[in-house]
Image (cartoon, helix red, strand yellow):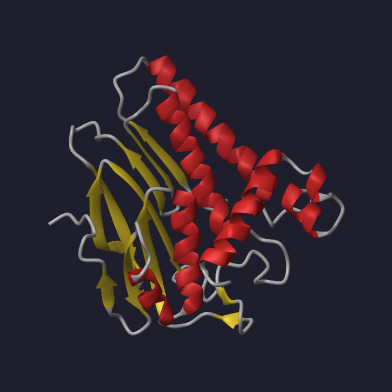
Amino acid sequence: MGTAVSLDLADDLPADTLRGLADDTFRWLREVDARFTTYRDDSEVRRVDRGELSLSGASADLRAVLARCADLWGDTDGYFDVYATGRLDPSGYVKGWSVQVASDRLVAAGAARHCLNAGGDVRVRGHSSSGRPWRIGVRHPWDGSATCLVLAGTDLAVATSGVYERGNHVLDPRRGEPARGLRSVTVVGPDLGVADAYATAAVAMGVAGIGWLDRLPGHRHAVVTDDGRLLRSTSLPLVD
């Protein structure tokens, strides 16, 4: 996935059990990376894009992801577009989706207290080992060593999309040009894959994405504009 992934398991379980859960989690994320990466010609998504593998012959995971991305294209008025770059690239959904699936699997396995962080896409459940809600720092878009917000909660999916690391890599699919206006978008909701896609779509919309996020039901957000303004939902669960 081209990013660091960390897992904090806070349940009081035997060490061998925790180690096994961690191994299973990272095994799943490596499997997703191998299947969906756009940086390897032999990945499943690249083979489908080139027409070497039919969609009907693809894995159930890939078919499910592309079906959900098609729904998200409609939900975002076309701004979340897996073909925005001219080739198939569902990365704007896949990272959040894979972390959400991993978190759901941990809960099902009895690890209901955890924090899984994949490069700023974060899923937290339950309480931390201190007994307090998890704290999630949102990176400052001009200072990688600082945060612009700190969130707290016991059941949060937090996705951030921005242009501060890879430049203006998010394209406005209507113009076919790099999106401008928003430096960073953080979306908080119940499902990390959806939050990830919504954050990407809002960046693609530019300044118009702020109003779209304000109207988005069931989600909260924080936006940093290119000119340095911080705008956020009033109900965002912030640490004082």
Lateral position of residue 41 relative to residue 206, left or right: right
Q: Is residue 181 above or below residue 109?
A: below
Residue 235 shows up from this direction:
yes
Residue at image coords 60%, 39%: 30
Residue at image coords 46%, 25%: 21
Horizontal and vertical percent position of residue 116: 40, 41
Where residue 219 sits, quadrant-wise, is bottom left
Q: Is residue 223 above or below residue 94?
A: below
Horizontal and vertical percent position of residue 54: 83, 50
Where residue 222 sits, quadrant-wise, is bottom left
Front in this rendered view, residue 69 or 237: 69
Residue at the extreme left of the image, as rendered:
240
Front in this rendered view, residue 193 or 41: 193
Horizontal and vertical percent position of residue 131: 18, 32
Residue at image coords 50%, 60%: 197
Horizontal and vertical percent position of residue 168: 52, 76
